[in-house]
Image: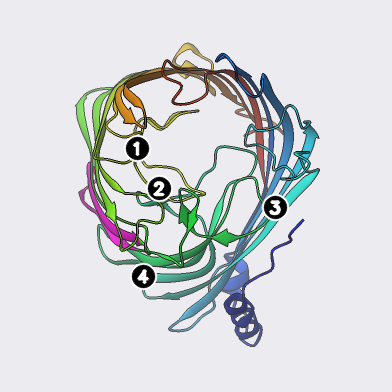
Amino acid sequence: MTRPHPSRPTLAFLALLSSTQASADFVGDSKASLELRNVYINRDFRQEGAPQSKAAEWGQGFITRFESGFTEGTVGLGLDALGELGVKLDSSRDRRGTGLLPFDPATKDPVDDYSELGLTAKLRASKSTLRLGTLQPTLPIALYNDTRLLPSTFSGGMLTSQEFDGLTLNAGRLTETNLRDSSSRDDIGYAGQTSDHFDFAGGTWTPTPALALTAYTSELQDIYRQHFAGLVHTLPLGEGLSLKSDLRYFDSQDAGSAKAGRVDNRNFNGMLSLTAGAQRFSVAWQRLSGDSTFPFLTGGDPFVVNLVTYNTFTKPEEDSWQLRYDYDFARLGIPGLSFMTRYVSGDGVEQGAVRNGREWERDTDLAYVVQSGSLRGFNIRLRNVTFRSGDGLTQDIDENRIILGYTLALW
């Protein structure tokens, strides 16, 4: 198994840091945690002639995070570290494929364990911070995946500036990715094709606490260019009552070469959520146009409202809508207990030989977080998923997940 090593720029930074007298802020402002994840996924393939009748895997994840403070001076230096270890508890070659565990490409046997070590050098001047090394961006055009045993990561550099009140700017370059079920770093890419780098720039302006406006531009070299504009607004309607609007628009086109196939996609999607006390009612709509599917980085997730547990509803020409209901049982005297159910339906897909393709998904979650005592913060989530596609666009499944989590603060 490939064991990744820190990059040369990161090692050079470590040498610089070791020669710099560590200040109390560097040590005193540091923090570390250990996150434990135990995940079981049982997926039953329901379509006729499925190559595999079921996939069932169980694993234990360990995620250690260290974040330093900054040294004193005009330019403060710091270092973050991320250590990830995934351990197989149960799987086999005929039950692999949940995305929980990697498997040997030759024998198809799931590996016993997989891991990653990521280091991030950081430099701060005024209210701007440059990070070099392992990154987990949460940007509309680059969103890391955190839906399995271990989260994915990217490698590169990102500058974040908050020099002006209410305005956060980000710019950077990503060059590699570590998938959620992998021990190695690979060149960044999309649709099975790799690229030298992914560049991005943009930011979010919050003129009032209730309104946020976001815009980004990006390019995956020789594959696609993507532009994004978004708006989030919260409107108070009375005591315990509010309406949240979340609107997003993407424009994606070819960039120089069509080695990943033609990229031509416009994606408008939005969600309205009405919160009334312990309840939240949401409705969403997603409209894609153009000749291709919606592009997003390998190792990441698409930033769309109809990204749900199993499907993304981002196929060419697809229209999809969602109805969602959330309930917080604290109102009934059971703090920490919550319920969510949603239904998403998509149609109009034009992909290959499929015309007016249709698909739907139904998800239900029941979650509980311990509120006090020695296990405070321990959480359990039970998740049920049903997905169907009448045109064979995606494999039909019935799925259940059990997810246990606990984060221990080391200091």
Q: Earlier in the sequence, mark 2 or mark 1?
A: 2
- For residue 81: magenta? no
Name the mark on residue 127. Answer: 4
For the C terminus, the quadrant is bottom right
Q: Are the two marked residues, 4 and 1, in contact with CB atoms closer than 8 angstroms?
A: no
| Residue matched to label 1 | 304
Task: Kindly state the secondary structure of the residue where label 3 is placed.
Answer: loop
Q: CA distance from mark 3 to mark 2?
A: 35 Å
Q: CA distance from mark 4 to mark 1?
A: 30 Å
Q: Are the two marked residues, 2 and 4, in contact with CB atoms closer than 8 angstroms?
A: no
Q: How would you classify the magenta stretch by its main secondary structure?
A: strand
Q: Are the two marked residues, 2 and 1, in contact with CB atoms closer than 8 angstroms?
A: no
Q: Earlier in the sequence, mark 4 or mark 3?
A: 4
Give the residue at x 59% y 19%: 399
| Residue closer to the observer: 154 or 104 | 104
Q: Is residue 269 left or right of residue 279?
A: left
Name the mark on residue 410. Answer: 3
Percent of width and height locating residue 16:
60, 85
What amino acid is found at the position of numbered circle 4 in the picture?
A: Lys
Extent of the magenta region? 200-219
Q: Earlier in the sequence, mark 2 or mark 4?
A: 4
Q: Earlier in the sequence, mark 1 or mark 3?
A: 1
Q: Residue furthest bottom?
A: 19
What amino acid is found at the position of numbered circle 2 in the picture?
A: Phe
Give the residue at x 44% y 26%: 393
Q: In the rendered image of this protein, does residue 105 appear above or below residue 159?
A: above
Q: Is residue 193 left or right of residue 254?
A: right
- Residue 14 falls in image quadrant: bottom right
For disc 1, the neighbor class at 10 Å (few under 14, some 14 to 19, many from 20) is many
